[in-house]
Amino acid sequence: MALGAVASFSLAGAAYLYSVVAISFGMFLVNLVAGVIWIGFGALIGRIL
């Protein structure tokens, strides 16, 4: 997923490093939120089962 995002959305030239950092930070935030939701639903389902 990270390779695809960097290959698709990174900028060329001098802005490459900054765009890769921005993409990485954005992916970190999205994955953090998704992970918290995943853990929450897993705990809920664990109680039900």
Image (spheres, rainbow, N blue to C red):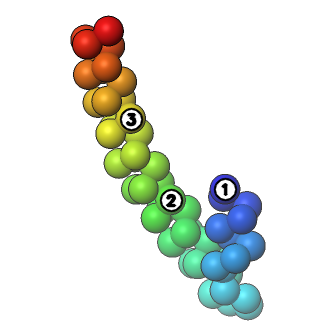
Mark 3: secondary structure: helix
Check if mark 1's residue and mark 2's residue have beta carbons within 8 Å. Answer: yes
Residue type, label 1: Met
Q: Which residue is mark 2?
A: 27
Q: Which numbered disc flags the more N-terminal residue, 1 or 2?
A: 1
Quadrant of res 46: top left
Looking at this rendering, what residue extends furthest in the bottom direction?
A: 13
> Are there few (<14), some (14-19), or many (20+) residues within 10 Å of tag 1?
few
Residue type, label 2: Met
Q: Where 11 falls versus 48 (above or below)?
A: below
Quadrant of res 39: top left
Marks 3 and 2, how far apart at CA? 16 Å
**Where is residue 6 shown, x and y percent of the image?**
68, 70
Callout in the foreground (1, 2): 1
Marks 1 and 2, how far apart at CA? 9 Å
Q: Nearer the viewer, residue 23 or 37?
A: 37
Q: Which residue is mark 3?
A: 38
Residue drawn at 32 percent across, 9 percent down: 49
Residue drawn at 73 percent across, 61 percent down: 3
- Give the number of the disc on residue 25: none
Callout in the foreground (3, 1): 3
Marks 3 and 1, how far apart at CA? 18 Å
- Give the number of the disc on residue 1: 1
Residue drawn at 66 percent across, 79 percent down: 10
Mark 2: secondary structure: helix
> Are there few (<14), some (14-19), or many (20+) residues within 10 Å of tag 3?
few
Q: Nearer the viewer, residue 11 or 18?
A: 11
**Where is residue 35 shown, x and y percent of the image?**
41, 39
Q: Which numbered disc flags the more N-terminal residue, 3 or 1?
A: 1
Mark 1: secondary structure: loop
